[in-house]
Image (cartoon, rainbow, N blue to C red):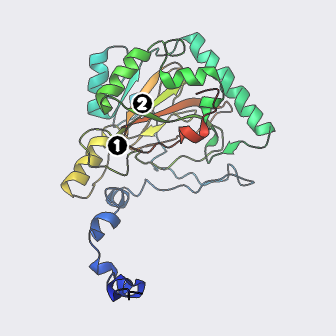
Amino acid sequence: MNKIPIEFGTEHIALASVPEAQMYRHEVNCQEPMRSMLEANPEIYFVPPQRGHDWGNWEYKSGSYYDTTIGAKHPDWRDIPLPQETKDIKQLRYDMVTWGYCKIEDALSVDQVEIIRERVLSQAEGERLAGIAQKTPSGQNINCCVNKGRCFELLIEQHPDIVQGGPLVEQLVTEALGSGWICTSLIAAISLKGGVPQALHQDQGFYPESTSPMSVNVLTAISSIDEKNGGTLLIPGSHRIMSDAARERKPVGKLPPAINLNAKAGTMVITDGRLLHGTGINHTDTPRIVMLNGMQKPWMRQQENWGVSCLQEVL
């Protein structure tokens, strides 16, 4: 039997692999641009989640990133032409590139919104009664929606039977990601009173330096959303700030303040995967419902493993 060379032994490899000797150590462990972003913006921090008996018992800190309002009411943003709901594809393109998000007006009709609302509320109640509800720090999520109603299948497809603005949505997503993009997941996100605000994050945190998005999220407002009921917290234009800092290997400085997203029910909001965002606070007694449909480059691993999760009869 041949003797294994000492260089292949685990002890030798470990001795030769102290952190200082490892290649790409800085790139792998630098945690930029999020590290410098958090250092320069202490008002942005992680609020510990509450899921059990301590639900709703968290400390609200004035001046924090979640202590904000919609753009039209915010003193730092109200005079700036942030994205508004529109069907104009030229304006939607401009908003997406400039601000990192755009709002497609009436992407769903009133009837289409109601179909999804009824299905979400019924499914959420059923999962609670069955003891399988996914409780989140903000409320309740419904995962694997593809198996839980024909309307969800059609929503994934952006089919006009449930998304009257589907062709426009698909065109914008294709321009952002290129042809052949895939759906990574479809989630119903229900925000409830007492939930904590989500930490600001990037869906595309794994590759922040790209000059165009690797992923986008299509948020469908089933409830009308604003600063009162948990409208998504976001920093307009942060997709560019974060990617420029990462690409230039420079620290992120002081960021503009976050705002709450506002949109009427039926609006679809496309967000760039590099945009800083997070679930807002629902101060009302009414559940806030949005559908989150993630899209990404076709070579990326999906959040949901459709081959395992999708029922055969759905396929």
Residue count near mark 2 (Cα–Cα under 10 Å), binned few <14, some 14–19, many ≥20:
some
Residue 139's spot in the image, x, y percent? Answer: 64, 41
Give the amino acid type for the residue marked by disc 1 in the picture. Answer: Arg
Q: Is residue 184 visible?
A: yes
Query: Which quarter of the figure has residue 121?
Result: top right
Is label 2 in a helix, a strand or a loop?
helix
Is label 1 in a helix, a strand or a loop?
loop
Q: Name the residue nearer the viewer: 212 or 54.
A: 212
From the viewer's perspective, tell me whether residue 88 is left or right of residue 122. left
From the viewer's perspective, tell me whether residue 228 is left or right of residue 129. left
Residue 23's spot in the image, x, y percent? Answer: 26, 71
Relative to 275, say whether 39 is above or below: below
Quadrant where the N terminus is found in the figure: bottom left
Residue count near mark 1 (Cα–Cα under 10 Å), binned few <14, some 14–19, many ≥20:
many
Q: Residue furthest right?
A: 129
Q: Name the residue nearer the viewer: 119 or 282.
A: 119
Q: Earlier in the sequence, mark 1 or mark 2?
A: 2
**Location of mark 1 (residue):** 274
Quadrant where the C terminus is found in the figure: top right
Q: Name the residue nearer the viewer: 191 or 194.
A: 191
From the viewer's perspective, tell me whether residue 309 is left or right of residue 23. right
**Location of mark 2 (residue):** 73
Q: Is residue 223 visible?
A: no
- The structure residue drawn at horizontal position 37% and vertical position 86%, both measured from the top left corner, is 4
CA–CA distance between discs 1 and 2?
A: 25 Å
From the viewer's perspective, tell me whether residue 234 is left or right of residue 312. left
Residue 137's spot in the image, x, y percent? Answer: 61, 48
Q: Name the residue nearer the viewer: 43 or 217.
A: 217
Give the amino acid type for the residue marked by disc 2 in the picture. Answer: Lys
Q: How many marks?
A: 2
